Image (cartoon, rainbow, N blue to C red):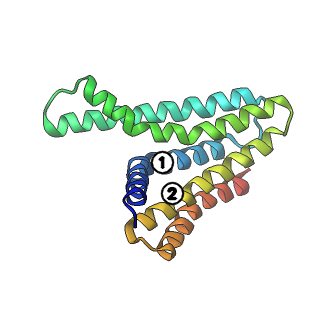
Amino acid sequence: MTDEREGRLARWIEQIEHNAFGAIYGAITVLALLMAMGHSATDPITTAAILFGSVLAITRAKAFAQISADAAHHRAAFGWAEVRAGWRHAQPTLIAANIPTLLIALAATGAYSAETAIDLSQVFAILLLAVYGFSIGWVIYRRVLPGLLHGAFTGAIGLALALLKFVLH
């Protein structure tokens, strides 16, 4: 392997390590919120705002809870450096909501229905889970089969939430 290729691989692995928690947490949060919303949303802009705002609130709550728990564990006050680090750690959670929010907001143009937007958002979240699951399996084992198994398992979590939404609504 060339040094350049090894460097790209190392950067990719670092990105997976940095973003995996937030992307998976964010995708599952999006699916859970969409399940709670149902298909009865009549205004896509309001639905998109509720989705993004809810993920933002959950993301901020998670970051603040982690910062507070770390401060209590270390028995030390936290400052802006800890707040910034907490926010950087939480950003991938919020990023996972961007595409579903955009897909739902675009339904307001009439290009497709709000129900289609919610379905597309679920597909995106499931695919995000599968891709991160595969990436994690590959990073751990450096083989395709474990990556595929991790991807299938992680994607199945999202698929189960989407199926539950279908059954409930």
Left or right: residue 107 compared with residue 125:
right
Mark nearer the N terminus (1 vs 2)? 1
Secondary element at image label 1: helix
Q: Which residue is depicted at the point 54% across and 50% down?
A: 28
At label 1, counting other C-alpha atoms closer than 10 Å, the crowd grade (few under 14, some 14-19, many 20 or more) is some
Taking 132 as reference, is 75 above or below it? above
Front in this rendered view, residue 130 or 63 = 130
Q: Amino acid at mark 1?
A: Tyr
x and y, in percent, of residue 145 in the image: 51, 76
At label 2, counting other C-alpha atoms closer than 10 Å, the crowd grade (few under 14, some 14-19, many 20 or more) is many
Q: Amino acid at mark 2?
A: Tyr
Secondary element at image label 2: helix
Front of the two marks 1 and 2: 2
Mark on residue 165? none
Residue that badge 1 annotates? 25
Left or right: residue 58 compared with residue 168:
left
The N terminus lies in quadrant? bottom left
Q: CA distance from mark 1 to mark 2?
A: 11 Å
Mark on residue 132? 2
Taking 167 as reference, is 143 above or below it? below
Q: Which residue is depicted at the point 49% across and 68% down?
A: 150
x and y, in percent, of residue 53 in the image: 56, 29
x and y, in percent, of residue 46 in the image: 70, 26
Q: Which residue is depicted at the point 61% across and 34% down?
A: 51
x and y, in percent, of residue 81 in the image: 26, 27
Q: Which residue is depicted at the point 77% across and 28% down?
A: 43
The answer to whether the residue labelled 1 contacts the one labelled 2, judged by CB atoms less than 8 Å apart, is no
| Marker count (numbered) | 2
